[in-house]
Image (cartoon, rainbow, N blue to C red):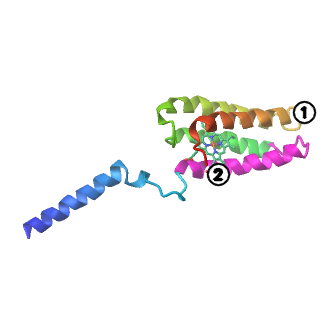
């Protein structure tokens, strides 16, 4: 009886420790990471911006650009899936994207919109080139 109780305690502790050290971090292939979940709406706003710019418009970018400025910093809150040894570079890259998104928002209604949109796209790419895994 005592051995059984002991066994139960041991397996409970083992399961708990497993949960702490890596259980939840092991994601199945089709499950989005927290970072992917944070990035998805940013990707959608970017797509909408691209359509606006492709139509040659320089109005209608402010709201989406402000959303990106407010949310792309979430990249700082998560461990990157690859190149973890370079994660110290993330805050500066995220700040660059925030600044680029703010610059696009500020360009609303001016001929600068197109250039600021492409600058924002480059700031996304700079971080993805290092930290986003290939599909
Ligand atoms: C500071 C780094 C960083 C910046 C800046 C950044 N991203 Fe990301 N993004 C990531 C990382 C890392 C991933 C990969 C996450 C993963 O696969 O777990 C990612 C993934 C994505 C994804 C894929 C999400 C999915 O469902 O797989 C989209 C879309 C995306 N980013 C959009 C953007 C856009 C648009 C910008 C610029 C406005 C941007 N990101 C800027 C780090 C960044």
What residue occupies the far left of the structure in this picture? 2
Q: Nearer the viewer, residue 13 or 64?
A: 13
Q: Earlier in the sequence, mark 1 or mark 2?
A: 2
Q: Is residue 108 above or below residue 52?
A: above
Predominant SS along the magenta part:
helix
Is label 2's Cβ within 8 Å of ligand 1?
Answer: yes
Element on which disc 2 rests: helix
Q: Nearer the viewer, residue 109 or 18?
A: 18
Q: Nearer the viewer, residue 101 or 29?
A: 29
Q: Is residue 102 visible?
A: no
Which mark, by number, is residue 77? none
Q: Residue at x 87, y 43 (%)?
A: 59
Q: Is residue 32 magenta?
A: no
Quadrant in which ligand 1 is drawn:
top right
Q: What percent of the width, then of the height, locates residue 114?
A: 85, 36
Q: Nearer the viewer, residue 131 or 74?
A: 131
Q: Is residue 60 magenta?
A: yes
Q: CA distance from mark 1 to mark 2?
A: 28 Å
Which residue is tagged 2?
40
Q: What percent of the width, then of the height, locates residue 22?
A: 37, 50
Q: Residue at x 64, y 51 (%)?
A: 40
Q: Is residue 115 visible?
A: yes
For the record, the magenta segment spans 34-61
Element on which disc 1 rests: loop
Which residue is tagged 1?
111
């Amino acid at each position: 009886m005592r051995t059984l109780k002991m066994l139960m305690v041991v397996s409970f502790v083992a399961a708990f420790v497993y949960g702490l050290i890596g259980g939840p971090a092991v994601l199945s292939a089709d499950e989005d990471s927290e970072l992917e979940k944070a990035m998805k709406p940013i990707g959608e706003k970017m797509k909408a911006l691209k359509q606006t710019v492709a139509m040659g418009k320089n109005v209608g970018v402010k709201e989406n650009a402000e959303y990106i400025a407010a949310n792309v910093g979430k990249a700082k809150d998560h461990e990157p899936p690859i190149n973890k040894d370079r994660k110290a570079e993330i805050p500066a890259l995220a700040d660059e994207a925030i600044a680029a998104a703010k610059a696009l928002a500020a360009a609303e209604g001016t001929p600068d919109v197109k250039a600021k949109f492409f600058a924002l796209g480059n700031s996304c790419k700079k971080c993805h080139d290092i930290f986003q895994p290939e599909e």
